[in-house]
Amino acid sequence: MNKPPKIVIAPEGRFHSLTAGKEYQVIKSNDDECFEFGYSFWINSDIEHNICCVEKYCPRINRLDWIIKERQSSTVSYLNKLTPNNLTMNETITIKGVEFDVQFNYTPEEPEVRYDKDMAGHPGSASEIEILEVQYKGTCFLEFFDGNLTEVESAVELWMSRQD
């Protein structure tokens, strides 16, 4: 069994925010390898931060496979990269009548602070959801959503609102 990628190279071709032949450092990756698509991982592209990719048949690179320059020597979990304010959750979420197993990071809302001891404050921030994995009956479905996870995020937000 392979380990998640550590450094990837974009294959030859024309891509929106990636350069063919350029090396990209993997920021984080999932620990579970999807049979069809390999590992999902996150990189900073040439113009965007924290984009999600998969090793094989990746929509970010016109459904081509990434060139894996180096793999991690041991599996590094994205859980190690979370701040204490983030929660990683695994839940069954229904989207258009189909139940998906969704793994996501949830960062709770941070309320506004008008003034602290140093007379400085901050505007606060809305809660955030970052989709890490979408599976149906054990099969990776990130590619099914073709990089547009808005519908999954909306379904997770709806599920979260019903938990209060």
Image (spheres, grey):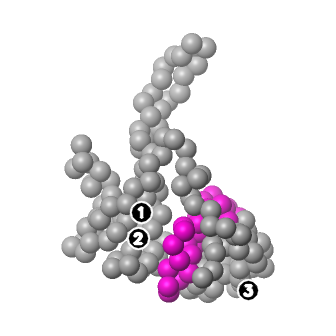
Residue type, mark 2 in image = Val
Name the N-terminal-most of marks 3 and 1. 3
Q: What percent of the width, then of the height, locates residue 160?
A: 29, 51
Residue ID at (53%, 83%)? 37
9 versus 52 height, above or below: below
* Residue 76 can be seen, yes or no: yes
- Report the magenta residues as a range: 26-53
- Residue 54 as seen in the image, left or right of residue 68: left
Local SS, label 3: loop
Q: Quadrant of the C terminus?
A: top left
Residue identified by numbered label 2: 134
- The residue depicted at 37 percent of the width and 60 percent of the height is 90
- At numbered mark 2, what does the secondary structure look like: helix, strand or loop? strand
Question: What residue did someone put label 1 on?
Answer: 103
Q: Position of residue 75 (x, y in %)?
A: 62, 67
In the picture, the disc for residue 28 is none
- Considering only vertical position in the picture, is 57 above or below 27? below
Which sits earlier in the primary sequence, circle 1 or circle 2? 1
CB under 8 Å between discs 1 and 2? yes
